[in-house]
Amino acid sequence: MCPVEVPGAVLRVAGDAWSADTEGLSGQIWRADGCYVKRAATDEHARLRWLGSRFEVPAVLAFEDGWLVLQDVGAPSLAAVEPVRAGTVLGTVLRELHSVPWQECPFDSRVAVAVEKARHNVEAGLVDPDDFDDEHLGTSPEELFEKLVAAAPADEDLVVVHGDFCPPNVLVRPDGSTVVIDVGRLGVADRHHDLALVHRELGEEAAAAFDRAYGLVPDPAKLYWYRLLDEFF
């Protein structure tokens, strides 16, 4: 069943029979009849409105008071696809996304903004050191933040980044067309923000396939820094 105090516009579209079974999707999200309902999704709604005229994303069926109803695309994600093929598709999709003119994007995720958000999360106690990658386990959030600041890139190759680009966030239909989901962290940043997260998720062969499809050999130092940045979110 749906939670209490759901806005009327959401109920009119999604009904009141909701399931918490969302196949591993994280956050406050439920499956309803022909759609998904997300809570605390104001940032994602704003980004969907901007990106939707430029890229394939799920249709917004309703939005009210931070509650977002998205059409169920009815397609599996690339997490269910053979890894090398998934890497190739990811590279193609990301190259297309990064071709969207970043000057038109109103959402700023550049280094200075990202570092300040990381600082806020550390100071607010929102960073869990138990969730760090293996290479950072045993380091405090404060110590890791100092490392983040010290190693910040001096230059940025700006594009529109997804912000959480990984196999589960790209859906692929039977005809091969794709839909990008979970765009709540989309914004202007260095392309390595996305490249770093893809490389972290893929094995060696799949990562090589991704690089070929994307058309760039990534900068290892930037890959590391953006993986480091992700520890704070």
Image (cartoon, rainbow, N blue to C red):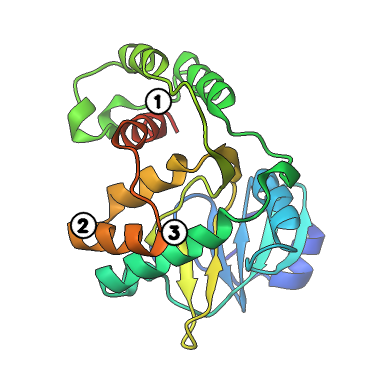
Q: CA distance from mark 1 to mark 2?
A: 27 Å
Residue 82 image offset from top left, x and y in percent = 26, 74
- Amino acid beneath label 1: Val
At 40% from the left and 58% from the top, the residue drawn is 215
Residue 126 image offset from top left, x and y in percent = 45, 25
- Amino acid beneath label 2: Gly
Q: Which residue in the structure is indicated by mark 1?
A: 127
Q: Residue furthest bottom?
A: 175
On the rendered structure, is 73 left or right of 105?
left
3 or 2: mark nearer the eye: 2
Estimate how packed mark 3 is, as few (under 14), some (14 to 19) or many (20 or more) residues with alpha carbons within 10 Å: few
Q: Quadrant of the C terminus?
A: top left
User: Can residue 123 be seen here?
Assistant: yes
Q: Which residue in the structure is indicated by mark 2?
A: 203
User: Can residue 6 be seen here?
Assistant: no
At 65% from the left and 34% from the top, the residue drawn is 108
Residue 164 image offset from top left, x and y in percent = 47, 48
Q: Which residue in the structure is indicated by mark 3?
A: 25
- Say which label, 3 or 1, has the lower sequence index: 3
Residue 19 image offset from top left, x and y in percent = 51, 68
Secondary element under disc 2, as helix, strand or loop, is: loop
Return the residue nearer the eye: 65 or 223: 223
Secondary element under disc 1, as helix, strand or loop, is: loop
Q: CA distance from mark 3 to mark 2?
A: 22 Å
